[in-house]
Amino acid sequence: MLDFLASKKPKILVIGDLMLDNYIYCDCNRVSPEAPVLVMNSKKQEKRLGGAANVYANLKALGAKALALSVVGDDENGRFLQKNLDGKILLEKGKTTSLKTRILSGAQQILRLDEESIKDTCLEDELLKEFNILVKDVEAIILSDYAKGVLSERICKEVILKANELKIPILVDPKGKDYSKYKGASLLTPNKKEALEALKFSDLNEINLEKALVRLKEDFSLKYSMITLSEDGIAFFDDKMHIIATKAKEVFDVTGAGDSVISMLAFCMALDIPMIKACELANKAAAVVVSKLGSASVSFEDIKKFEKANFEDKIKSKEELCKLLANKKNIVFTNGCFDILHFGHVKYLEKARSLGDLLVIGLNSDESVKRLKGEKRPINSQFHRACLLSCLYFVDFVVIFDEDTPYELIKALKPDILVKGADYAKKEVVGSDLVKRLELIDFEEGFSTTGLINKMKE
């Protein structure tokens, strides 16, 4: 699928609030004697595309023929954007182009300074004229609204009307509490906080989430309704609710994650990719971008690397895992040989993961399996068993141990919840004295490694 998508170059138009992100990287070694503030020694500055311009950058990184349509200030930053983006960028006298300057020490953001003017553009007629020229051979449109004045009610309504006339999918990253100006779009991509404010819901539990999605779809005449759920993934509604789990391994900086999501969704919709697959790819794009610092774009090559690393990178040594889990909570731990991975294992591990926020599997090494099961076991090597377990999306980490029991491993990792099969109901569970809670889970009937081996022999 990724190779197929990487070979395509859909033409996609981005309309919205263009910005520049300015990063100033500093050393910080002392506090000022003049006031209780940090003294920052500037080492390097870097300008990146931000706001709707970051959506444009993400589309370009995916290989799309991206076009930008916007109004910026008649200033140095506006002319920089005009020069570096394809499409049509109008310059407006008296308007200040949005510039967000972030001051960082190492990877830590210390301060953000914004320069901008927030008012509806005076160039609506010119913008719509340029839109009618650019839209003729476009395959998808994104409205990237940062509430800086480009996407006025008139602009949104006329652009959506024209897109529907031409049967072009139109996606909106919305802002504000009133979504009426986006009525008739293909989909909106609010996050949880934005959806709560727009719908006046008190919370988004599972029941309310489906109600919220239905309300969005019906009230604003959408083809799909969608809410991005941060660490919980993406929820969308067509004729029923779907939740696509997140793919992120480590969150380093959430800047621009929403831009990556809507860019991937637009790319897929331009090519008629099914929405479930589009959401899976959008989640992967977001997972890549949150592992980077600042506004960043994602390519299909980045996603390939992420997918390749996504399972082998889950296999950790005890020492590595101790560091990674040091500040984590609600860690679930279970252990076993998992020699021939079968349906019973999968259901057991899925239930185990649902009990907490992280699932760690202690995997018996080849030598310990031989001691426990006999010289003819294991059937599969410890590396192959670890890789298969790591491919399960609900497994977060796998650690191989050589002892007969995982007691020392549990002692080192300090999990909160220990999980074993229900057949341990009347047995002493190794490591139960080291955890806050022991949970016993029923196995799926008719599934066991020994049973599979005997069946194959027969």
Image (cartoon, rainbow, N blue to C red):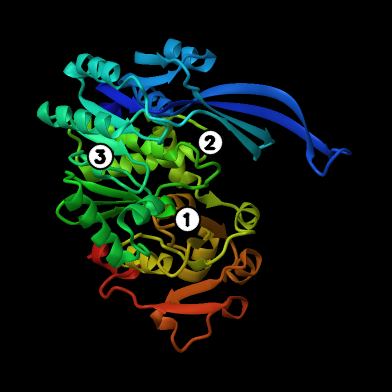
Q: Position of residue 191 (x, y in %)?
A: 38, 49
Q: Which mark is residue 181?
A: 3
Q: Which mark is residue 396?
A: 1
Q: Residue at x 83, y 41 (%)?
A: 35
The label nearer to you, 1 versus 2, is 2
Q: Position of residue 210 (x, y in %)?
A: 25, 60
* Type of the residue with mark 2: Lys
Disc 3 and disc 2 in contact, CB within 8 angstroms? no
Res 301 → quadrant = top left
Q: Residue at x 60, y 22 (%)?
A: 46
Could you tell which of marks 1 and 2 lies nearer the N-terminus? 2
* Type of the residue with mark 3: Lys
Disc 3 and disc 1 in contact, CB within 8 angstroms? no
Res 385 → quadrant = bottom left
Q: Cα distance, mark 3 to mark 1? A: 42 Å
- Which quadrant is home to the N terminus? top left
- Viewer-side residue, 373 vs 117: 117
Q: Secondary structure at mark 3?
A: helix
Q: Cα distance, mark 1 to mark 2? A: 20 Å
* Type of the residue with mark 1: Asp
Q: Which residue position holds label 2?
A: 292
- Determine if residue 84 is in view: yes
In the image, residue 37 above or below residue 114: below
In the image, residue 13 above or below residue 433: above
- Seen from this angle, which residue lies furthest bottom? 426
